[in-house]
Structures are given as structure tokens and as C-alpha cells.
Amino acid sequence: MLYSGLFLTFASGFVFVHCFSLRFTLAEKTGLAFPLGMALECFLMLFLDQAGIPLTPVPLLTVQTLLLAGLCAFVYFYRTNALKSLWASVSRPSLKGINLVWLLFILATAYMEYMNLSKCLYFPPSDGDSLAGFETIGYILAQEHTLKGLSIFDASYMPGIHGPASYITYAPFVQLSYAYVYALGAETSKVIPGLMYLFFLLAFYGATSRVAGRTGAAVATFFMLLTPEMLGFSSLSMTNNMHAVFASLSVIYLSLWFTKREKKDLLLCGVLLGGNILCRTEGIVFIGSVLLLLFIDAFRSKQYKGFLQASLFALVPLLVWTLYTKLNGLYAESIAITHLFWDAEKAGIITSYMWMLYNNTLYYGWSFVVFLIAFLANLWFLIRRRDSLGLLLAIGLSSLFYILILYQIDYKWDTIDNVLSYSAKRFMFCFIPMLWYFSVTNHAVKSLFLKLERFLAHTSLRDAK
Amino acid sequence: MGKYNSNKHDKQKNRAQAPPQAEQTNRGGGYLTWVVKNVGVALVVGFLLSRCLEVQQGYNWAYNSLLKGNMATIRANPNLTVAQKNEMKLGIDYAYLQFVRNATPEDAVILYPSVDDFFPEGVESPFKHGISNKMWGLRFLYPRKLVLPSEMETNRYAGDITHVAIVNGRGYERLNYEVDASVVHGVLPVKH
């Protein structure tokens, strides 16, 4: 039953991507399939739960089968030659950009991910934050078949449930996806973070290769995977890496939209933003920055339709989740300071911690260093051609909004030092893929990779399309 | 002129006929160049990559300790059960909760030790992880209900307690009968 559920999740996501366009690469379609399929399933679980339908295997698999059927019908009626296009990409893979350097990085990435996935699936959840939150909620949810009516959400049983930063208000993606696999008979929930990260690598590679070529994408994927702290957390059952999947890909697709002006990327950016907010509440910083940039872009071109569609995809999950929490009394004491104020000491602590994180090569390897070098190398093209400007603005604005949120929080449930040392460190995972994406897709570095590919390509493949 | 033309014609003819052979030679030479270039660059990149994994501390840790170290553990213990793996990761915290789980019925209401009981000041506690967190404990004890000593006034199950959990020799005073307090870690029923 678990395998059927995982297959249905993958299949729904795979077909869902086709609803936007048939022209994504096979790596993108495959890579996005599992994260989007899981996000769709969790989104539907909220409706099932609200309707009073128990979250047991039969309703879960039935609703997912119906979803898959509906998506297939949409693709069949609205996307002509879907099967032909899929078959073409599978049966006639392009060999352009294939070289030994590419192969070396792909094999190294595959080997490392094999070890990472093995570790992830072998060990049951053991990280404290997850056992005190998402993992336990998911496990109990699978026994009690409801989220809104969970016994651990009952204040007369858990007296601190409505206290500041309580787990009752955690965004639902992780606990619902854990509940999904537990309900289908999984022994541990680690299959979710394991598969999320595996598919993410594929999606990141697919999206990056559209701009940087295969070799650049392989190099970026390898170093992104190897980022020490992020790699360590990718095999735990925490939310941060799963959040990074949605948040980073949404910004990457925003950048693809600015670069290629293909509507499919814009819509996918919106959908991924929606997934991002279902993962973690801080995801609002990416919604804020990306929608702001999209609005400026729409305002300049006087074309608002795409912006509105992307906003709809981004905001509907947020609205549904907010409504769900209001309807079911899932609230906690606010930790936000809603008025503006100036606290030089607090600002100083936050700035120094963030600076320390940017400089920490033990946590993030060479991610920030390479980003800085690439930024400087591309400065000329940035100034003259505004190359990668949208991406840089998205990264900068999101960071700024996050720092503002850290500043506006009233640290009454934990110390600011703890939050900065642990939460902020992990929040940075969202930026690592963006940094590597920029590092290989900016004009200066991209040109080098494309030259390398041409140098290493066989004459018969050099000019192949 | 004619000769020249004739020669030119021959050359053109030869050239027209040449491609298959030339292409053959080219392709042979092309493949050799391609292989040499690729192998050369791949060797250089491979060397740099291995140096990078050695020199950069973070990457070194990720590759050698995190990935290879854990793979060695996995290969050495391929057939462990989930419970054994939990014990491997969570140590005595998990072993204690498993003991409580096995010693109590599913509908038990357990008076769960406080943080101070698990980690008494000035005493070395065998517990290392987040066991004092009620949610953490519930992950392994569910569907049993847990009541903390601090919740005796507020928890709806406070009046229905069936068992008292004992850790570090603490918790005996919460029982409603006298008992030999020699057991350091355990769980005892409440008399009704």
C-alpha cells in the first residue's frame, strides 16, 4: 500500500507539471513530480479533514486516484500530443553537452546521494526538534485520522498548546506527509525527506541545465548536494530541507521566467511558492519578495495576467491553511511584534550572527565564497545588461525580509541566540541552491562552462540541437 | 588552360569523392582528440575534486564522516530492526521508553517525570536526548496518556493516573503507597 501511495504521489506530480507545459525537460518533470505530488496530497488532506472524512488509507488513496484521473483528463484535453512529447524526450535523449567532466560530476553526485539516501532510509527519526513536533504529530495523526481533532491539540491534555511558537500552528506539509506514509504502513517517516531530497536534486539539475548547460548544472548540483550542514540535515526528518526544496526552486523558476519569458516558468514559480508556505511559515519572505518582483515586472510591461495567476497559485495554499486554522481553533500566542521599534542591541546581534553564518565555510562549504566570486566576475554584465538582476534581487530581498522578521520577533519562548544559532542556520538552506544556481548561470561563468562544453564535445555533437 | 581545367576538374572530382575517406580519417582523428581532451580534463577535474574533499574541512566531514562513516555503520549492521536502530541512535532514552511501553497497557495514564527528574542538578544523568519533552515521550508511548507533575491542576487526565514513571530514583513520592526505593529507573502502578 505504501508503494502504491508513493507511486500515486509521483504520478500526480508528474502529470501536474504537464498541466503547465509539455516543454519542461525530463529531469525537471521527474524531479518536480514527487515534491509537487506530495504538496497536492497534503493540500487535499486539509479539505478531507475539514469535511470530517477520516484520513485513513482508503480515502487518501481514493482522493489521490481521483486527482490523478482529473489531471490526466486535463492534460489529455488541453495539452495536445502529451504522450508523443513524453515518449520523444524518453526515447531520444539529447546528447548535447555530454562529456567526461559532466559524467564525473554526475557519478560523484549519484554516489553521494546514494550514501545520503541510504543513511536517511536506514535510521529512524531521531532529531529532537522533529520528535518534539512534526514526527510525533504525523505519527499520532496517522492513528487518530484527523489533524484538527488531534488529542495533542487539546488544551486540557496539553496545557501549553496555545503558548508562543507552539507546534499547533506549524505549517502542515511535513506532518501531513509523515501521516500519509504512516497511514499507508511505513515503519518510519524517513521515506519523505529521503525522496524529497532525491527528487529535488533532479529538479535543480534540470532547471539549472536549461541555462548553464549540462556541465555547469552537474557542477552546481554536486556542490549544492555536498554543502555540509545541508547534507547533514537532508537525511533528518526536519522541515528545513523540504522547505528549501520549494523556496529555492520557486526563486529559480522566477529567474527562469525573467531569463526565458516562458509562461510555464512563471506559473510553476507560483505553485512552488504555494508549496513553500505549506512547509514553513517563514516561507512568507519568499512570497513577499518574489511577488513584489513579479508585480514590478508586470507593472513595467503592463501585463498583469501572468502575475495574477502566479499570485493565485502562491496565495491560495496560504489562505486555505489560514482559514483551516481559524475554523478549527489552531492558534498560539503571537510572537510577532507588530509595531515598529528600534533596538540597536538586537539589530547588532542579528547582524553579527548573520554575518557569521555567511562566513561559515564549515556549515555551507564554498557556497558563499563561490557566489561572491561569481558575482564579482559578472559585475560588468550585471551593470551593462542587468544579467541575473532578478535573481539577485530575489535573493537579497528574501534575506532582508528574513532579517526583518527575526528583528520583529518577541523571543519569549526561546533566546535570540538559540534561534539565530539553530533556526537561522537552517533557514539558510533555502539560499544555498539559489547561490549555486546563480554561480553557474550568470553570463560570465555560464560562458566559461559553455566554452568548456564546446571544447569537450565531439565534432558530431558540437552543433547538435 | 584545358589541362588546368582538366586538373581542376579532376581535383574537384577527387574532392567530391574524398569526403567518405576524409570523414573516416576525421572521425577517427576526431574521436581520438575527443577522448584525449575529455580524459585529460576529467583527470585534472577529478584530482581537484579529490583535493577539495580533503582540504575543505566541511566537505571533508560531509564525505568522510557523514556519508562514508554512516555507510560503514549500515554495512556493519544490515539487519537491525527499527527498535534496535532507535536504541542505537537514542540510547538509554529509547530503552527506558520501550521498557515503560512494555510494562504498561495501551490505555495507561502515566505520571511522567519532570525535566528536573530526568536531569537532576549536580547529578550525572544517563539520559542524553529530549526525553523530558512530553511530545518526545509520546512518540514512543502513544496511545498511553502522559501527565507531567506540573500539570496536576490543569490536565484532564490528572485524576486518572494509573502508573508513575521513576527515573534517577525520583518519583516514588508520587505513589500512593510505600515501596522499596532501590530501583533507579522504572514504572510502577498506582493503587486504586
Image (spheres, coloured by chain):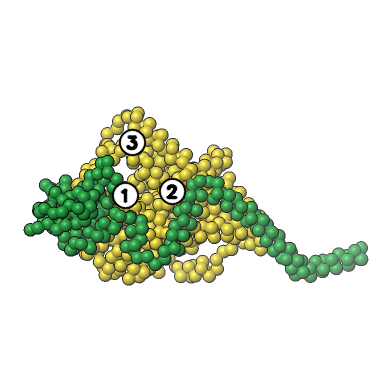
Chain colours: A yellow, B green
Mark identifier at residue A18: none
> Label 2 amino acid?
Glu
Q: Secondary structure at mark 1?
A: loop
The chain letter for the residue carrying disc 3 is: A
The chain letter for the residue carrying disc 2 is: A
Name the quadrant of the N terminus of chain B.
bottom right
Q: From the top left corner, tell me how far across and down residue A159 is, in percent.
A: 17, 48
- Tell me if residue A312 can be seen: no
> Label 1 amino acid?
Lys
Q: From the top left corner, tell me how far across and down residue A344 is, in percent.
A: 35, 28
The residue drawn where x is 27% and y is 51% is B131
Q: Residue A402's image quarter?
A: top left
- Tell me if residue B54 can be seen: yes
- Same chain for labels 1 and 2? Say yes or no: no
Q: Which residue is mark 1?
A: B128
Q: Residue A272's image quarter?
A: bottom left
Q: CA distance from mark 2 to mark 3?
A: 24 Å
Mark identifier at residue A407: 3
Q: Secondary structure at mark 2?
A: helix
Q: Pointer 3: residues within 10 angstroms few (<14), some, or many (20+)?
A: many
Foreground label between 1 and 3: 1
Residue furthest left in the image = B192
- Same chain for labels 2 and 3? Say yes or no: yes
The residue drawn where x is 23% and y is 44% is B116
Above or below, comparing residue A406 to residue B7 in the picture: above
Closest to the observer: A458 or A253?
A: A458
**Is the residue under label 3 in contact with that under label 2 (CB below 8 Å)?**
no
Name the quadrant of the C terminus of chain B.
bottom left
- Judged left or right of residue A278, residue A219 is right
> Label 3 amino acid?
Tyr
Q: Secondary structure at mark 3?
A: helix
